[in-house]
Image (cartoon, rainbow, N blue to C red):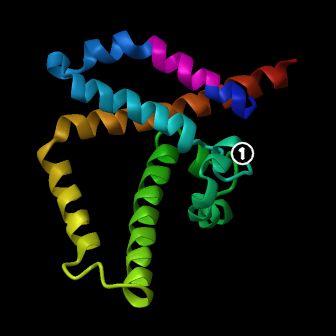
Amino acid sequence: MPSGRVHDRLTLTTALVSVPIWILVTPNHDPIDFCCGIAAYLFSGYWLSGDLDTNSICYKRWGLFKFIWWPYRLLVPHRSFWSHGAIIGPLIRIIYFAAAAFIVSKCAVLVVNKYFLVVDRTGIVVHTKLSVLAWLQTHPQPVLAATVGLILGGLTHTLADTVVSFWKKIW
């Protein structure tokens, strides 16, 4: 399986090579959709890698926030269908990250409210969640582009692992 640096180079190279394809397949050639797709692809390759279940470069990039991936590391076996599945792996990491981000932000607001000062008089976390969900529903094209980018970024990682493993078995 390739090293983290090889995965990083592959992510950047494939993102750059895919720019003309993204422009062609983006409806109405909307730059917002295009940017959402490419940004999501890069985010998926660098931050939501299939190797988050190991002590990888991707895992270390999270710095102080890598604690949010501890349960994922315990529950998801490395190179399993759940971590390296073509579509299911990236989708699981996307859903997991969204849920973890919501829980961490909710806990942070609760701690600040209890021990420092009341900052959440109007339910800011819940309001933000509802606003994000409303935006997602009213802007389907950027959401679709981002979802495709997130999945393709994970798929690139899985394909690289599969190809290298295949060649190692042959040689």
The extreme left residue here reads 138
Q: Is residue 124 at all visible to an observer of this figure?
A: yes
Residue 3 versus residue 139 in the image, above or below = above
Mark 1 packing: few (<14 Cα in 10 Å), some, or many (20+)?
Answer: some
Characterize the magenta stretch by its predominant secondary structure: helix
Q: Quadrant of the C terminus?
A: top right
Residue sitting at 46 percent across and 57 percent down?
97
Where does the image place residue 132, in percent across and percent down from the top left?
23, 56
Name the residue: 83% across, 24% down: 168
Query: Which residue position is annotated with label 1?
Result: 56
Residue at 29 percent across and 32 percent down: it is 145
Instruction: Tell which of 82 and 148 is nearer to you.
Output: 148
Judge by depth and name the residue closer to the eye, 118 or 160: 118
Q: Is residue 65 left or right of residue 91?
A: right
Please state which of residues 65 and 40 is positioned toward the viewer in this rendering. Answer: 65
For residue 120, side relative to residue 6 (left or right): left
71 relative position to 14: left or right: right
Q: Secondary structure at mark 1?
A: loop
Tell me the amino acid under the disc marked 1: Ser
- In this rendering, is residue 110 above or below 33? below
Q: Residue at x 23, y 35 (%)?
A: 142
Res. 154 in view: no
Q: Is residue 76 magenta?
A: no
Which quadrant of the figure has residue 148? top left
> Any magenta on residue 12?
yes
Extreme residue in the bottom direction: 114
Residue situated in front as seen by the camera: 77 or 69: 69
Q: Which residues fall within the magenta stretch? A: 9-17
